[in-house]
Image (cartoon, rainbow, N blue to C red):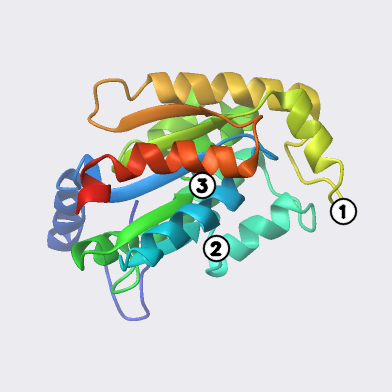
Amino acid sequence: MPGPCRPGASFTSSAVSRRKSSVSARPKVLSGFIVIEGLDGAGTTTQLSRISARFRALGRSCYATAEPTDAPIGRLIRAALRKEIAVDPCTLALLFAADRNEHLFAKDQGIIARLARGEIVVCDRYLFSSLAYQSVGCGYDYVGSLNAPFPLPEHLIFIDVPPEECQRRIAKREGKELFEELEMQNEILRNYRRGIDSITGSGTRVATVDGTVTEAEVEEKVWSLVSGSPIGKG
């Protein structure tokens, strides 16, 4: 998608050509990039904190991050998820894609820049969440087309927790966000499975982890997957 147009700037044919070239040149799989996914209440944020802490304890440079981000577009998304503002479902899908683009390609602090410096990046949610959640409102194919240009992670860890158990967990939170109703979570789970299946053979290491056990047990399973791979041996 096009970059921002600054005052006094224009999109010349050469600029557009460079932009298209950069999109086509994106690596398909980003080495050192770990993504943790799951339904709301699956414990992705907890595992983000635990796994990144274990890398740091080994003296590895590890950046823990999440989507939506804390950048301006991400904050707008969070307001929509909290139902503080109302946006069309496809507008929300576009906002997620825009936030992801900045998350990846921001100069110096973007995911790709960090990986290039040798950092490990662990992310709580990525494009698979868009395929799962935003497809509910505006269709899988449309959301897939928005996210097709983005590179894939080296590791995708899906924390598998039944929707009913996730509902029990999130019932303890204050206020419900969009997408947290049980019927919708079942549809989201089906979308997740479709999205994960779609990257078979891509080079991404995909693993499903039982999230109904204790947080420590989930951590050990996730850690065994990533520490035994080239990332862990780096």
From the image, tell me which residue sits under label 2.
Answer: 73
From the image, tell me which residue sits under label 1.
Answer: 174
Q: Is residue 43 left or right of residue 20?
A: right
10 Å crowding of disc 3: few (<14), some (14-19), many (20+): some
Q: Tag 2, which secondary structure? A: helix
Rendered location of residue 183, percent (x, y):
77, 22
Quadrant (top left, top right, bottom left, bottom right) of the C terminus:
bottom left
CA–CA distance in space, label 3 to label 2: 10 Å
What amino acid type is highlighted by mark number 2?
Answer: Ile
Q: Nearer the viewer, mark 3 or mark 2?
A: 2
10 Å crowding of disc 2: few (<14), some (14-19), many (20+): some
What amino acid type is highlighted by mark number 3?
Answer: Leu
CA–CA distance in space, label 1 to label 2: 24 Å
Residue at (67% x, 57% y) in the render: 78
Rendered location of residue 205, percent (x, y):
30, 31
Q: Nearer the viewer, mark 3 or mark 1?
A: 1
Q: Is residue 51 left or right of residue 16?
A: right
From the image, tell me which residue sits under label 3.
Answer: 94
Q: Tag 1, which secondary structure? A: loop
CA–CA distance in space, label 3 to label 1: 27 Å
Residue at (36% x, 76% y) in the render: 6
Q: Pointer 3 and pointer 2: residues touching (CB < 8 Å)? A: no
User: Could you tell me if residue 119 is visible in this image?
Assistant: yes
Q: Pointer 1 and pointer 2: residues touching (CB < 8 Å)? A: no
